[in-house]
Image: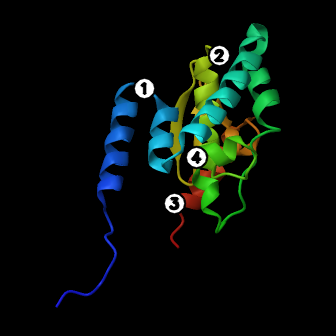
Amino acid sequence: MRPNIPQLWSDVDRGAALACRRALAGDDLLGALFAIEGASRLHRIETVARVQAWTAAVAAHPEDRIGALRRVLARRLRVAPPLNPDPQAAFVTAVSGGAPGLPAIIASLWLVVARGAGLALRPVALPGRLVLATEDGRLLDPADEGAEMSRRALHTLRRQISQPA
């Protein structure tokens, strides 16, 4: 006799994983996040509209797009408290709408807007955070309003990681 346990990996999950892979293959990070979330059509439309507006606002300042990126997104995207029990923190649609978000979701939104505005930022995974590297090698931390990570902060992070627990 088999116990009555809900299926852990369903056809819906398989479909979402496939949609995510397709989006990533097409360099569509936002589409991949929508697929993982299972976002409704309405939430996708609302999120795309917000991201397009933010992108236009950043692109309107070609002389200082990094500064514009900080000004546009730092006030709108808030980091969720550590150990946040709210699953909405992992949903790009909720975070773009003002809900506190996980640092990786915030960094993903920064990356989508930056690339749309013509900035060649690339993601860099560090333990516990996702930061964005500029063409000249600076590291911006979207979870800290786009603050540039100093060498000292990187050394401190490295020491914390290398210490045994």
How far across and how far down the image is residue 42, in percent? 60, 38
What amino acid is at disc 2? Ala
How far across and how far down the image is residue 112, in percent? 58, 28
Residue at mark 1 = 27
Query: From where the camera sits, is residue 24 visible?
Result: yes
How far across and how far down the image is residue 76, in percent? 79, 39
Residue that extends furthest to the front in the rendered view of this protein: 42
Query: From where the camera sits, is residue 133 visible?
Result: no
Please give the name of the residue rendered at 32% of the width and 80% of the height, measured from the top-left corner: 5
Which dot marks residue 117?
A: 2
What amino acid is at disc 3? Ser
Residue at mark 3 = 162
Answer with the quarter of the image where residue 75 lies: top right
How far across and how far down the image is residue 133, in percent? 58, 29
Residue at mark 4 = 104
Answer with the quarter of the image where residue 109 lies: top right
Q: Nearer the viewer, residue 77 or 153?
A: 77
Q: CA distance from mark 3 to mark 4?
A: 22 Å
What amino acid is at disc 4? Ala
Q: Secondary structure at mark 4?
A: helix
Q: CA distance from mark 1 to mark 3?
A: 34 Å
Neighbour class for label 2 at 10 Å: few (<14), some, many (≥20)? many
Nearer the N terminus, badge 1 or badge 4? Answer: 1
